[in-house]
Image: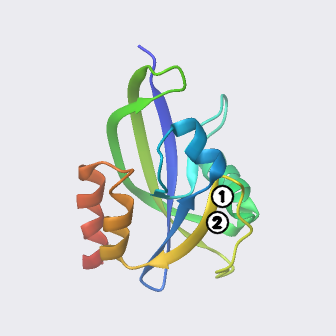
Amino acid sequence: MAFSIRIKALILDKGKMLILSSGPSELFPTKRGKIFWDLPGGKIEWGESVEETLRREVEEELGIRGDGLQILRIFDASISKIRISNGIRMPLLLVTFICRLKNNKREFRLSDEHASYKWVGVEEGKKLLSTKFGRSFIEVLSKLEKN
């Protein structure tokens, strides 16, 4: 059975998380009609490790050198379904890691995948991310409030 593995970086700083709004190159292929919020990350490429994927995606999406990302620990892993370009649905394994930026950078050069970014608290993050992420992930975000 075919499945997709996606890796996401939950970047934290001073009690806030970094989230990204969808840009034109994300809206068209997904046929989502409206803007959604996301975390930096993406698909593992063949032969790439999880760490390499996180660093590459952060560099591509935020304009930060991959070595500027500190990967702390796994935060969540969940299985859901994803619709791929030909309309077929397949299982998706989504693994999210808690990360920090080594240089405390708070301004970014975004790729065309994203139109904007913002730092938000847990409650706002749960609300904004709920249009893309599953209920189980949103529930796990509540654990951040306790840390």
The percent position of residue 136, horizontal first and vertical second, equals: 24, 51
Q: Earlier in the sequence, mark 1 or mark 2?
A: 1
**41 left or right, relative to 46:** left
Name which residue lies at 44% across and 29% down.
83
Regarding residue 50, the answer to whether it shows in the image is no
- Asked if residue 94 is positioned above or below residue 88 in the image, the reply reads below
Identify the residue shown where x is 70% and y is 63%: 110
Residue density around tag 2, few if under 14, some if 14–19, many if 20 or more, within 10 Å: many
Q: Which residue in the structure is indicated by mark 1?
A: 58
Q: Nearer the viewer, residue 40 or 96?
A: 40
Residue that badge 2 annotates: 69
Say what amino acid the circle numbered 1 marks.
Answer: Val
- Residue at the spot 50% in from the left edge and 27% down from the top edge: 84
Q: Is the residue under label 2 in contact with that under label 1 (CB below 8 Å)?
A: yes
* Mark 1 vs mark 2: in front: 1
Q: In the orientation shown, which residue stands out farthest toward the front?
A: 33
> Does residue 124 appear left or right of residue 136 in this picture?
right
x, y percentage for residue 89? 40, 23
